[in-house]
Image (tube, rainbow, N blue to C red):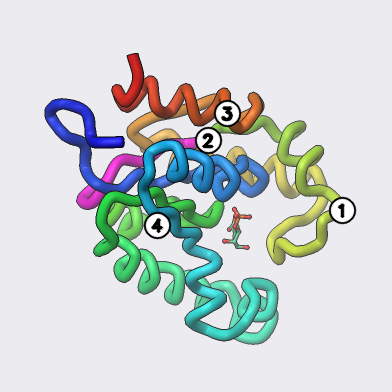
Amino acid sequence: MKNPEGGLPPIIYLIGFMGAGKSTVGRRLAERLGWSFLDLDEEIEKREGMSIAAIFRELGEGCFRSIEARELERANSAGDSVIALGGGAFCSTRNQEIVARTGISVWLDVSIETVWKRCAGEGSRPLFGSREEMAKLLEHRRPFYLKASIRVDAAASVDTVVDEILDFLGFRG
Ligand code: S3P
């Protein structure tokens, strides 16, 4: 699908908390647009040859954040593409600037209830803790997520969320 009249920046960044569905929605959105899809965490794992969990465990969160920022710089040279960011990536001013300069940001907004339902007991996310800790982290991050260009309620089905994003961006109707 081509950019609508007037043209959008070539990259759609999906941001939001763990469990918001950034990767699933991102893949479907890219498919619908005929654009490429990139998952920043997957790129990090490929480049480092380690899982995100192992990076946190062996190198620490500070090191993960530097790798994440570097990978985001690399990723933004991709052409028309949808990029899913990890839940903490948009909380850095530097990363926000990269996103604003190179694309449009879409916040997939989810409640703590949805996060808990989707992620509790999964065990693969190094920062995932108790429900209280997650609620606190979500509140802490909300002001950063609010800086996104667009907010979409991500509790709905994947196709509904994708339709809403396409509508917002003027790709439909
Ligand atoms: C993180 C979320 C994870 C991953 C890393 C840190 C976070 O990605 O980047 O574990 O800080 O919220 P998802 O949001 O895809 O789970």
Quick check: 132 above or below 152? Answer: below
**Residue named by callout 2:** 108
Q: Main secondary structure of the magenta part?
A: strand
Check the image and report above or below for 155 versus 45: above
| In this picture, residue 111 sits left or right of residue 109 | right
Residue interval drawn in magenta: 100-107
Q: Amino acid at mark 1?
A: Gly
Q: Residues within 10 Å of mark 3 (few under 14, many from 20)?
A: few
Q: Secondary structure at mark 3?
A: helix
Disc 2 packing (10 Å; few <14; some 14–19; many ≥20): many
**Residue 98 place in picture, x, y as percent:** 27, 56
Of label 4 and label 1, which has the lower sequence position? 4
Distance of label 4 from label 3 (alpha carbons): 29 Å
Residue at numbered disc 1: 121
Q: Is residue 73 magenta?
A: no
Q: Amino acid at mark 2?
A: Leu
Residue 114 occupies quadrant: top right
The tag earlier along the polypeptide, 2 or 3, is 2
Specify whether tag 1 is near ligand 1 (CB below 8 Å).
Answer: no
